[in-house]
Amino acid sequence: MIDANGLTFEVATCGTGERLALCLHGFPETAFSWRHQ
């Protein structure tokens, strides 16, 4: 969980390194939407 500006976000992380890929899903989907990416 990450807190930012009074909001709490649930996050999933994997891998290591300097690059970041940010995948946002739309409502009412979940992170499961990205399982084949």
Image: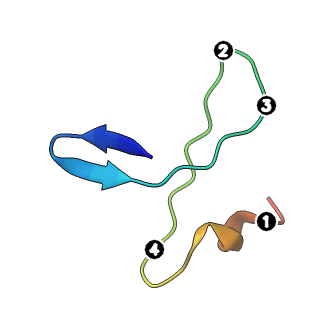
Which residue corresponds to mark 3? 15
Q: Are marks 3 and 1 in contact (CB under 8 Å)?
A: no
Q: Nearer the viewer, mark 4 or mark 3?
A: 3
Q: How is the image coloured?
A: rainbow
Which residue corresponds to mark 2? 18
* Label 2 CA crowd tier, 10 Å (few <14, some 14–19, many 20+): few
Which element type, helix, strand or loop, lies under badge 2? loop
Which residue corresponds to mark 1? 35
Outermost residue to the top = 18
Between disc 1 and disc 2, whose residue precedes?
2
Between disc 3 and disc 1, whose residue precedes?
3
Q: CA distance from mark 4 to mark 1?
A: 15 Å
In depth, the one of 1 and 25 nearer the eye is: 1
Between disc 2 and disc 4, whose residue precedes?
2
Which residue corresponds to mark 4? 26
Which element type, helix, strand or loop, lies under badge 1? loop
Q: Position of residue 29 (x, y in %)?
A: 53, 80
At 45% from the left edge and 46% from the top edge, which residue is drawn? Answer: 1
Q: Nearer the viewer, mark 3 or mark 2?
A: 3
Q: Could you tell me the amino acid type at mark 4?
A: Gly
At 45% from the left edge and 74% from the top edge, which residue is drawn? Answer: 26
